[in-house]
Amino acid sequence: MNAFENFHQAHVVLAKKFSRAIYLGPPFDERLVALIQHLFTEKEAEVARALVLFFPRSAEKVAKKCGKSIAETEALLDAMYRKRTIIKTKKGYFLMPLIPGMFEYVLMRGDDTPWHREYGRRISELFSTGYISKYIHRSLPAIRAVPVQKAVESKTAVRDSSFILQMIESHTRFGVLNVCQCRQSLRFSGKECRRAVPEDGCLVFGSWARGLAAAGSGREISKDEMRNIVEERWKKNLVFMTANVHAENPNVICTCCDCCCHYLEAVNHFGAGKTVSRPAFIAAVNEDMCTNCGRCVTVCSTYAHELAEKKHQYYPEKCIGCGLCVGVCKPGAIEMKENSRYDKPSKTFSRLIARISPAGIFSIMKAK
């Protein structure tokens, strides 16, 4: 019996495309085809098969490839664009990976419909199978944790783009997304975050904040509002994760936790720790002062701190330098120290891409 006989052929073919290594795709199986069936109607899937990853194609070219009229093709492309299952630019339309990519784009507006709820549940379940691990083979310092400045400012004279305050001072435009897509998908699965709410959306810096409201993805905020939001997120013991580039670049900060964030899920369980840059600061524990209270364990999202038989254990190789443990350690047994193996941020995104491309290409080829 054909495992896919209950699916339309267009959905099967499109699922095969999304399963490719270049898309960082999950294994081609019934679960993936069912997800694609949920995302695309049969006619949409017939058209989407003619699109490619990241390179725009005009409606005319897509119509020619799939044998439909330009008018019908453009209507279907625009319907997919409105659902955010594809990207539309001035040059045309293109596909994006399921995650990261479509996952964030579909959910960032904060839409809460039966269709969005089912999508959130399906994609989260698929990611939790750990398939992403097959794409992580070498170290590529693409993402960095932004340390809690209060935890380190009294300990060092270093002032560089590792700090969030440098990011704030380097820009004049700011924004915040309507929701955190990970917390929203968790809620769609019937669970709630232990530290924050879905409405605690990602923080946007620089030119990327322009047009958030027009796109329905978020709102622009002032510099003072950004400072206040940052302070509020710190108090919630959220981890600040961003692309490993200098502060003056347009960027996005995700405010994460281990119970919701798919990226931290991959770091903790699927080998994605290789994509986290070595931090500017790392926690140092004075075990002689430690009272084994466990406060550091409750805030650490990478399990660098642990209580084993009521005795504190610390694993420095898991520390991403966020500094949250310092803020809750009342005995003062933890401090942040400069890390001599620090992976400094790249000057620009193009330099970051050049820096991580060899390892990334190797991992994709190995996955293929």
Image (tube, grey):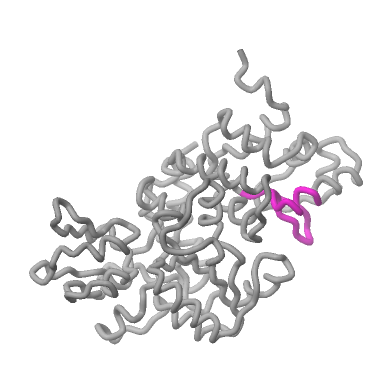
Magenta residues span 78-96
Asked if 199 appears above or below 30 in the picture, the reply is: below
Which picture quadrant has residue 178?
Answer: bottom right
223 or 330, nearer to the observer: 330
* Residue visible at 35% across and 67% down in the picture: 343
Question: In x, y percent, where is residue 306?
Answer: 22, 56
Asked if 342 appears above or below 270 in the picture, the reply is: below
In the drawing, does residue 300 fall left or right of residue 53? left
14 or 129, nearer to the observer: 129
Asked if 93 appears above or below 329 in the picture, the reply is: above
Asked if 131 appears above or below 357 in the picture, the reply is: above
Q: Is residue 182 magenta?
A: no
Question: In x, y percent, where is residue 35?
Answer: 62, 37
11 or 54, nearer to the observer: 11
215 or 365, nearer to the observer: 215
Residue at the extreme top: 1
The quadrant of the image that shows the N terminus is top right
How many numbered discs sit on the rendered protein? 0
